[in-house]
Structures are given as C-alpha cells and as structure tokens.
Image (spheres, rainbow, N blue to C red):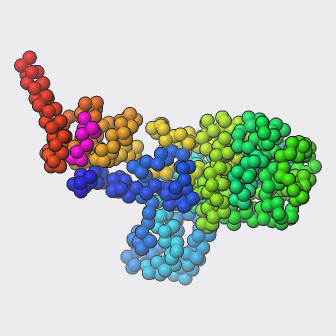
Amino acid sequence: MSWRVLGSALRLTRKPLVAQILRGNRRSPLGHHRAYASSSLQAPGDTGDWKDAIDYRVDPEEFSFLKDYTNANGQVVMQKLVNDLRKAGIQSSDPRLRESVAAFQRAKEESEGLMQYDEVKHYVGDNLTLIAKALSGKMIIPDFPRFKDDLGSLYKEVKPNTAGELFEAIPQLGKVNPEHWAVSICTVDGQRVSFGDDSVPFCVQSAGKCLNYPLVLGDSSSEHVHSYVGQEPSGREFNSMMLNKNGRPHNPMVNAGAIVLCALMKPELETAAKFDWLQQQYTRLAGGEFVGFDNSTFQSEKLTADRNFAIGHFLKEKGAFPKGPSFDLATTLEFYFQTCSMQFNANSGAVAAATLANGGVCPMNGQKVLTSGSVRNTLSLMLSCGMNENSGMFAFEVGLPAKSGVSGCILLVVPNVMGMCLYSPRLDTHGSSVRGVEFCKKFVLKFSFHHYDSLLQSEGERYDPRRQRLSSKDHFIASLLYSASEGDLRSIRRFVSRGTDPAVTSYENRSALHLSAAGGYLDVVRYLVEECGLDPSHKDCFGRTALDEAKLGNHDSVIEYLEKVATEQEQGSDEADVS
C-alpha cells in the first residue's frame, strides 16, 4: 500500500485509538502475556484479527505520562497519581509496586505528597511499564472504573437470591453462614476488584481439582496421567462410582479422577511432605496471598466420607491406581481429604484463577507456576467437565472454563483476560453455588466473554471491556475502511453482513471505494459498486473520485472498470432524460 493511501487511512478519524489500529500498531492486547502469545487458546471473543486489536506496548524510556501529574513548580502530585492507579485497578498493596509505594508514602509524610519529577522517575524504576500502562489506559481492561461499576451492579442483582441448600453431607460445611456472598476478580495485568465477604476463608473442596490436575501434569506427561484418568465428561454426579469403558475415571474433575490424581502427585514424598508441597504450590498460585487449611472440615469429611472410601476401593478393585510399593489407599484418601480442606478466600482464589488465565504465570509477581500445556489441558476439561453433571448447560450458557466445589466456591477463567472467584455456600442440585452460577450467567450477558461471542455482533448492552471506549460504529467504520485500503474483501463482506454501512466515509469524505481504487484492488471495487451500490462519482473533500485515485496509482484494470461504469451511468442518465 502506498504512503498516500496509508496516510489517507490514518486520517479516517481524529481519535487516537483508531489511528493506532490503522497505523498497524496492532499487537494483540493478549500478546504481551507470555504463556499464550503463541497458543491456539485465545481469549473468548478474540478472533485473532489484529484489526480488532490495539497497541498495548509502552516505550520503556517514556515518562511523558508524569506530566499529567506535575504542578506548576515541576513537582509530581503523588496522591493524584496513586488515586489514578487505584482507579485503573492497581491496588497500593500490589507486591509489584512495593518499593514505589514505600517511596510515595515517604513523600506524603515528608513533603506533603509532592516529589520532584526526576525523583519519581528514579523510584518508578522497574515499575515503569506497569505504571505507564495503567495510567495511559493500556491495561487488559482499559476502562476499569466502568467495568468495576458494572460488576458491582451484577453483584447487587444476584445478592437477593437465597435459593439452594448448604452441603450438610460434610457436617462442618453445613454450619457455615449461608449469607456469605463474595466476588473477586484479578486480571492478567493484576487489576483487582472485590465485592462482599472477600476476606472470609472457605474450603476449596472440588474447586481445587482444577489446580491439582495441572500440578500433576507439571511433573509428568499428559500421556502418563491420562493412562490412569480419562478426558471425557461423565454426565453423572461428581461422586458417581461409574468408570469409563477402559475402567478408568472419566476425567480429573470428578471425585474418582481426583483421588487417582492424589496417588499420582509426588509419589516419592511422604504424606506430610506432600501436603507441605501442595500448600506451597497453592500459595504460589495465589501470589502469596491467603492459603489456609481447615482441620475441622478435614476431620469432619474423613468421618463421613463413606462414598469416597467406596470409590477408592472400587478404583483399587479395577486396577485404576498406579502399581508400586509407594501406593497406599488409606494414605491416598487421607491426602485427598486434605486437598479438599485447603482454604482460599475470594481474593486469593481470584489470583489462582488469574494464574490459569495467564497460562500458568501468576500476574501478581510474574512467577511461572504451571506449564502452559498443562493449563491448556486444564481449561479444556474445566469447560467440558468442571460444573459436574451440569457442565454441558454451563458451557452452553456461559461458555467459559469453571470449576465448582460443594463449599460454594466457583473458580471462573476468562483465558488471557482474568480469573474470578465466587463464594456463596447455598448450592443447587448439581452441587454448585446458586448465586455463583447466576452471576456467571449475568456476567456473559453483560460482557462479551462467552467463547463464541466473536461470531456475533454486539447485541443490546453487552460490550467487550477489553476494548477502549470506542463506539461500535467508529470501530466498524475504521475496520471496514482499513480493510478496503488493504484489499481485504473477505473482511469487508463480514463487516457489511454485520450491518456496517459500506457507504461510510472518513471525515475527509473518503469512502471505501476511494481507498480500494487507490490501492488497485479491482475485486473490492467491483464488490462495492455492483453489490453495495456505491457511487463512483462520489467526491472526497479534495474533489477526487475513485477513478481519480486509480489514475494517480496507475491501476489500469481499475481505471478501465470505473471508466466503463461511468460511461454506463452517463448513457443511463441520457436515456432517462430522453424518456
């Protein structure tokens, strides 16, 4: 494409975001997250089409954002900067900002919250990229205040729902406060927001299965693990005693599969060392935030776990456990009960879910906890098997990987975007939190996060919070006109089929026909004239038609076609005058 055509495309709008799209600063908003940069697993709603992306890069030497926080004396007003970081979802307790926040706090105490420009640059240090991205609206959720408000509204809408029952099969779980209701979110950029009882600890129960599985895969091959555990939904309750046709548990997300995983996890370690290792891994997954252990629930579950003991003996009778002197059924079952009694609160659970969303890299400290391959397998199984026998309906309605537990916990993952933890102990008949499931359904009705939302044009109030506050109309205009300048007929057809008017113009009054003619794209020109009915005589603000553009570019085939069309139009006009 010529510089003249590119320059015209860049002038489609004065809005910086569209200019970024059209300049080709098109690195995917997901691409800066290492684990999924080249993975086939994309964020729901992301088609991989760079025309729909925006530039999330920040020049490491660029401190210009500080000018917005500098007073007339050249001092940076730190409170304003910190407030804007908080609005962007970056909390002052963020471990990545520990050094910077300490310096900012000293400035607040010693110099009325003011710091010299060069001093701020010094203390920002390694946090430059994070702070600059947050303050310039380049995080994965650019308009975080709006997103936060919408989440808060959903939280309030769901709170009155008091349907469901506590899980009394484990006596301690039947004693918790049924009114607890918490939602916490952590994005892959570390943006955080929580609502309700976010600091209340709870046992992970079956929700921990989606963490135990990738941990086991990290120490062994997928082929080895799945020689003991299948990958198919069972269609039955999570504590069913049914095995697949090979005499193996259907998948790692049901009790039978999880029990076998406990036998496969660190078989070389004694029980106490294995428990310590698992707790350390949970702590890493949660970015060092709260991880506990509820001994009373552990003891309560051991005393009432006849069903799980029966499953264990059934598995042993079928030869489903690994052979060897290190295997002991009683020890394996006890360790399984311990894994169920591990504790998160909503905040730490959200970080663990975000680590899955970020391909195994904890967003709060950048540590690689899980392999990207194990995360891919885990999210696949969470989508198909994570919500017990209701997994198919949940995948149909919500379209996101999730795992529930009978404590009332749900871990939900929006791959490459965020992790969410929901906690409300009243359960439906499938063993999942009633409030949690309702929130998930409303979540994908409000936001374009369902796995197949990319196939649909935005409907109603649903929107994609990953995008800048660019109107849907502006977005499609920019995309259509850029596609015309690149000769991308397939994309143009797609935009037109979604309702974009092919006759839209830039503020210079240049149409898609101008841009395609200037590039010499005859197939696009023919489509716009013959199927879309665009007028070749339309002039831009410079008085040029599409034919003029084709002549400037010496595109003979386009010139010949447009001259023929012009001749036919003139003849048709003359015949009309005669009649």
Residue situated in front as seen by the camera: 226 or 165: 226
Residue situated in front as seen by the camera: 104 or 220: 220
Outermost residue to the top:
579
Q: Quadrant of residue 354?
A: bottom right
Q: In the image, 76: left or right of 36?
A: left
Q: Tell me the residue at 66%/54% (across/down).
A: 374
Outermost residue to the left:
578
Q: Tell me the residue at 53%/60% (across/down).
A: 33
- Percent across and percent down for residue 162 are 73, 39
Magenta span has 520? yes
Q: In the image, 437: left or right of 317?
A: left
Query: In this rendering, does residue 406 appear at all?
Result: no
Query: In this rendering, does residue 390 appear at all?
Result: yes
What type of secondary structure mainly makes up the magenta span?
helix
Quadrant location of the C terminus in the rendered image: top left
In the figure, 476 relative to 527: above or below? below
- Percent across and percent down for residue 227 are 75, 48
- Percent across and percent down for residue 298 are 87, 54
Magenta span has 29? no
Q: Tell me the residue at 63%/38% (across/down).
A: 395
In the figure, 457 relative to 23: above or below? above
Q: Which residues are magenta?
A: 518-526
- Percent across and percent down for residue 138 are 46, 60
Q: In the image, 371: left or right of 261?
A: left
